[in-house]
Amino acid sequence: MGFKALYDFLHLLNKNNNKAWMDANREQYVAVRDFFIDWLDQMNRRLATIDDLYYDTPGKKAINRINNNLMFFPNKPTYKDHFGAGLDQLSKQGDFYIELGITESSIGGGYWYPDSKKLKSIREAIDYNGDRFVQILEAAPFKKYFGQMLPTESLKRAPKGFAEDHPYIHLLKRKSFAALHFVSLEEVCAPGFDDRVEQIYLALLPFRRYLNEAVSV
């Protein structure tokens, strides 16, 4: 079992996206899922050795459900086209996110459209020490793997309590703060993928720590 088998299963699922097919192929799904959980367990142990503040996240806790939430998104297919998981997961947002899918695969983290309370805390942190956040965004490792934060909707005017001429107004107007590094199927299946995941984790760590500290105040 390996990542190629994981992708092969996702392609089959995408062509047969219904409960009857999943039930008939449950053993194959469980085998692929167990492989992914085992790999997550390995990465969980590995990342804990390089980050003293790492939050232990076993694979079974890290992995996301493959079912789409049809109650809130009734027009989506029954099953997702990817396996997703969050390591270093104190909460669902701010974790180290890994997604392996047939449309795209990516590794990253941050806060994607956080609730108003978290967003307010992040803005207050930027107001207090935005220079530190800018240094993180301009650091060579972050630029190498992510380039910049993911595009997001932004306010047309300064958020309440902040001046329009604030030196970091372009950051304060943002509605989300997240970064992703996209990887190809070939990269995932090649030897050394675990090393690459570790490098991306370290490159993203200052960014994630800054945001997590902001929302915890």
Image (cartoon, grey):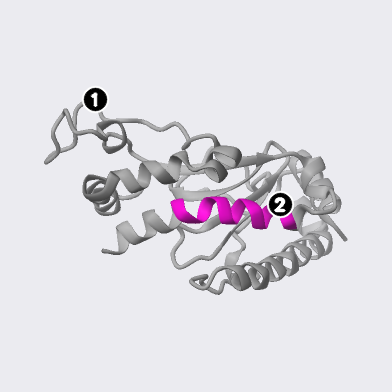
Taking the spot 31% from the left edge, 57% from the top edge, the residue there is 214
| Left or right, 217 with reference to 6 | left
User: CB of mark 2 within 8 Å of CB of mark 1?
Assistant: no
| Residue 126 appears in the figure | yes
* Outermost residue toward the right in this view: 1
**Counting residues from the N terminus, which is met first, the one under dot 2 or under dot 1?**
1
Mark 1 — residue? Answer: 156
Look at the image and tell me in which quarter the N terminus lies.
bottom right
Foreground disc of the pair 2, 1: 2
Mark 2 — residue? Answer: 196
Numbered disc 1: secondary structure = loop
Taking the spot 82% from the left edge, 41% from the top edge, the residue there is 186
Look at the image and tell me in which quarter the C terminus lies.
bottom left
Answer few, some or many: residues within 10 Å of disc 2's Cα (few below 14, many 20 plus, some between 14 and 19).
some
Numbered disc 2: secondary structure = helix
The CA distance from mark 2 to mark 1 is 38 Å
Taking the spot 73% from the left edge, 40% from the top edge, the residue there is 102
The amino acid beneath tag 1 is Lys
Answer with the quarter of the image where residue 60 lies.
bottom right
Residue 65 location in percent, x, y? 60, 59
Q: Which residues are magenta?
A: 195-207
Depth check: 148 or 144 in front?
Answer: 144
The amino acid beneath tag 2 is Arg
* Residue 116 forms part of the magenta stretch: no
Residue 170 location in percent, x, y? 30, 31
